[in-house]
Image (cartoon, rainbow, N blue to C red):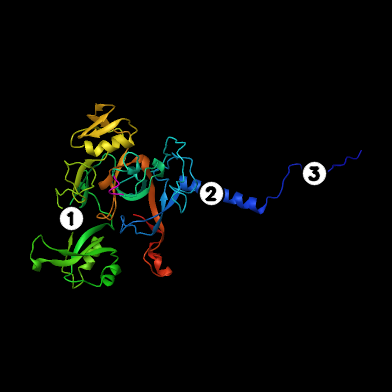
Amino acid sequence: MEIKVLKQKSVSGNKKKSAIREWLDSVVFAVVAATLIRWLFFSAFVIPSSSMENSLLVGDYLFVSRLHYGTTTPVTPLQVPLTHQTIWGTKIPSYLEWIKLPQFRLPGFTDVKRGDVVVFNLPVEHPDLYQKFSSVLPDLHPHPVDLRTNYIKRCVGQPGDNLQIKNGQVYVNGQAEENPARMQGEYFVSTGTAVNELNVFKKNAVTEYAQFTETFNDSIPGNDEFGYIVKTTSAIAEKLKAFDFVKRIEPVLMPANLKEPYLFPASESLSWNKDQYGPLLVPKKDQTIQITAQNAAIYADVIKSYEGNENVLFKDGLITMEGKMLSEYTFKQDYYFMMGDNRHNSADSRYWGFVPKDHIVGKAIFVWMSIDPDPMGFLTKIRWDRIFRVID
């Protein structure tokens, strides 16, 4: 008997996708893949301000590794993909706070170390603190912890470090910390008369300068000394000395016991400034400290806003929790002290305090593109010598 095999029509309903459907599938796949890469592995950031100059310049585009310190799980999952705080080109919030999840940090392969250039979420955008620091950072808004404004600074204090700044030099545990190679300070350049600023300053990579007259605190006009206040590196300051019209160059430092306004912490008992600061202990997880009248202002914000405590009050130099005065406290997570490399033009931990570990985003690895914001020709806007520069 002959058996014939009959071909059956496919009943699977396979249809060729339309061009629109294929395009939509491609877009969805690309968005999902980019979101996962951005969350798990690395993110791209751009430098908007001069607080890290001369190490990082305005217009530098960076890749930031989330793997180094371990990426964190999202707290606010209801968010438009590939956005941060607002929908592109608008002020419309890109997230909803209807659902909030606990945050966890996946394993990383290193911890934040002194000298690391770190991206983190600005801690003072906590709802309890943002108005308090609005005089230093006027554009503050309260956001969830994973959506607070991204900041980039250099870690100068690890958990458990005793930190102090004397005459602009950072000391950690009694030892002078090695300064970043391209750290900027503030200098008075005495010239006696105005100079060609383009040839003198801009051609020597000095982007921040202003005319200044040193009066020596007297009323004798003949003692006045004309010059410029510049922010630059020590190496460039030495180079400027070679100009024959430069009389002298001196670092500008605030004297000891001159209290600077808006500095952290807000305490009348402390006369600190940006160049003469501390000493203070950087909080460490499971470390217990004694709360005193001298340090209560330093740790009040930490205990109240970043540790998950409730009913914490700081008043008249005393910290109370649940109505009871705190005489000691054990910290629940690690904290860090961050500073910009442009030491006289950086809103950093000297002005708003410690960075909690749960605010750490990642480590800045390298510059993949750098565009000079000054209005020049297109080809000259690209800083070719900075492309793929490793960040140190």
Q: Quadrant of residue 196?
A: bottom left
Q: Quadrant of residue 1?
A: top right
Q: Residues within 10 Å of mark 2 (few under 14, many from 20)?
A: some
| Lower sequence index among marks 1 and 2 | 2
Which residue is nearer to you in this view: 321 or 10? 321
Amino acid type at mark 1: Leu
Mark 3 and mark 1: Cα distance apart in space: 86 Å
Which residue is nearer to you in this view: 31 or 314? 314
Q: Position of residue 392 (x, y in %)?
A: 33, 54
Residue 253's disc number: 1
- From the image, tell me which residue sits under label 3: 9
Q: Residues within 10 Å of mark 1 (few under 14, many from 20)?
A: some
What's the magenta region? Answer: 133-137
Query: Depth-wise, is mark 3 or mark 1 nearer the camera?
Result: 1
| Lower sequence index among marks 2 and 3 | 3
Secondary structure beneath dot 2 equals: helix
Query: Depth-wise, is mark 2 or mark 3 nearer the camera?
Result: 2
Q: Are marks 1 and 2 in contact (CB under 8 Å)?
A: no
* Residue 275 in view, yes or no: yes
